Image (cartoon, rainbow, N blue to C red):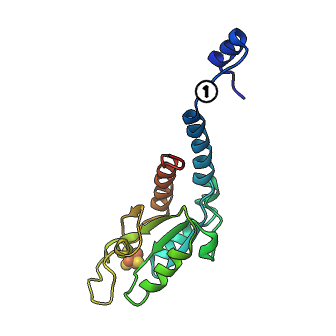
């Protein structure tokens, strides 16, 4: 534990220190967010070419374990990050929504690639023109296909978002 000089001085002088419930809750919030951001468990909803890049991201070359996000779950009940990679059709959307609803709170979503984010070049009546119309998306990854580095970048952005989120207040 690092040396906290003002705290040490206050202890020497008074024999006790005081704090507020608000600052203790703030500290608790920081600890909770630290745990959450460094232990994200992804659920992969890969339907097309983007998911191949996603598979590459999970390889040892990119080493998602550095961010604590290498534990890919294949049950939505054990995951807190939904990564949608690829085209999603109207017929598939109820399945995606069901998966999202089965994931416990708190949960986050990354939309990977042009197709998932806006339909890409597939402006047809069967294709969803952006999954954010049906599930709340936190981070969008542009590109067709995005590279694994983009996925890592999105994960780091999500970690910053989780770090800044309000848990108790
Ligand atoms: S964005 Fe490009 S690479 Fe990704 S699923 Fe669509 S067509 Fe394939």
> Does residue 121 appear anywhere in the picture?
yes
In the depicted structure, whether residue 4 falls above or below residue 120: above
Find the residue positioned furthest to the top: 13
Q: Which residue does the image show at 42% across and 68% down from the upper left?
A: 111
Q: Report the side of 106 relative to 135 (left or right).
A: right
Instruction: Give x and y (percent) for residue 76.
Output: 59, 75
User: Quadrant for ligand 1?
Assistant: bottom left
Q: Which residue does the image show at 60% across and 54% down from the upper left?
A: 36
In the depicted structure, whether residue 83 falls above or below residue 93: above
Instruction: Give x and y (percent) for residue 129.
Output: 30, 78
Q: Residues within 10 Å of mark 1 (few under 14, many from 20)?
A: few
Q: Report the side of 141 relative to 17 (left or right).
A: left
Q: Can you say which quadrant of the picture contains the N terminus? A: top right
Q: Which residue does the image show at 45% across and 81% down from the upper left?
A: 48
The front one of 74 and 165 is 165
Q: Which type of secondary structure does the marked residue at label 1 adopt?
A: loop
Q: How many marks?
A: 1
In the depicted structure, whether residue 24 falls above or below residue 2: below
- The residue wearing badge 1 is 19
The front one of 131 and 100 is 100
Q: Which residue does the image show at 55% across and 38% down from the upper left?
A: 26
Q: Is mark 1 within 8 Å of ligand 1?
A: no
Instruction: Give x and y (percent) for residue 7.
Output: 65, 19
> Does residue 63 appear anywhere in the picture?
no
**Quadrant assignment, res 113:** bottom left
Instruction: Give x and y (percent) for residue 99.
Output: 53, 78
**Quadrant assignment, res 139:** bottom left
């Amino acid at each position: 534990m690092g040396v906290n000089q003002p705290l040490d001085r206050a202890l020497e002088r008074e024999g006790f220190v005081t704090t507020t419930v608000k600052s203790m809750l703030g500290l608790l919030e920081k600890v909770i967010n630290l745990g959450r951001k460094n232990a994200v468990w992804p659920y992969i909803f890969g339907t097309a070419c983007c998911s191949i890049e996603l598979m590459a991201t999970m390889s040892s070359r990119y080493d998602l374990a550095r961010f604590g996000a290498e534990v890919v779950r294949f049950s939505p009940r054990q995951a807190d990050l939904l990564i949608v990679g690829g085209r999603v059709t109207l017929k598939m959307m109820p399945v995606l929504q069901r998966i999202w609803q089965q994931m416990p709170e708190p949960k986050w979503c990354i939309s990977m690639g042009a197709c998932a984010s806006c339909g890409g070049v597939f402006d047809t009546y069967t294709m969803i023109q952006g999954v954010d119309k049906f599930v709340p998306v936190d981070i969008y990854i542009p590109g067709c296909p995005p590279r694994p580095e983009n996925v890592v970048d999105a994960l780091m952005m999500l970690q910053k978002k989780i770090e800044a989120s309000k848990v108790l207040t």
